[in-house]
Amino acid sequence: MKNRKLLLCTSIIISLFLCSFASAADMIKIGYVDIQKVLEQSDESKKVRSTLESLKSSKEKELEKMVNTAKKLDEELKKQQNILSDEAKKSKVEELEKMDRDIRRFVSDSEAELAKKQREMENSILNDLVNIIQKIGKEGDYTLILPATVILYSNKVIDITDTVLKKFNELKK
């Protein structure tokens, strides 16, 4: 519902904008960019995904070590349950509970760290992307460049996604 309202409002604004330039139609130059495609296919986005996967993998290995240590302690407790004193049992149970809390905290912290890193990297890419689109707009004397998400129909002639992707990849080399 919210997206429909946004799309309707955007369509109305664009229509009004285009109508105001109807007398100067030969001067209007419009383009659109599929930002999602650029984000999926750009070399920089691939590097970001690789970096995030590497970080995630290292966190998973660290978590696996913690879980294995906790499992060993739990197995040890079960094996020695009958021969340990009440105080020793209590100590091992407390140690196991502490490990469980540490594991939960580690998972939570790791997820937050990964999400933060992903947001930072995506924001950096989006800022660079906006700058490139603005530069292309100025250099190409565009009147308007829109994101593809607000376009219901368009001729592919005004799709500048590949140009943006090429310039973006060149910038990041």
Image (cartoon, rainbow, N blue to C red):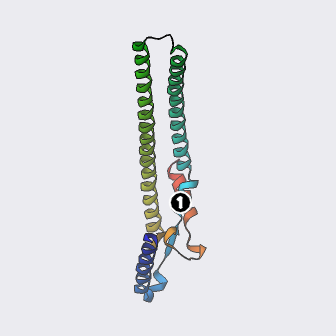
Task: Locate residue 82, reporting x and y percent.
Answer: 51, 13
* Residue at 42% over, 55% down: 127
Task: Locate residue 29, reporting x and y percent.
Answer: 49, 76
Task: Locate residue 79, reporting x and y percent.
Answer: 55, 16
Toward the viewer: 171 or 79?
79
Q: Is residue 74 above or below residue 5?
A: above
Would residue 103 be visible to someone looking at this image? Answer: yes
Toward the viewer: 128 or 53?
53
Q: Is residue 159 above or below residue 92?
A: below
Toward the viewer: 16 or 98?
98
Q: Name the residue that disc number 1 marks.
A: 36
| Residue 117 in the figure: left or right of residue 54 | left
Q: Residue furthest bottom?
A: 23
Would residue 142 be visible to someone looking at this image? Answer: no
Q: Is residue 153 above or below residue 98?
A: below
* Residue at 45% over, 72% down: 1
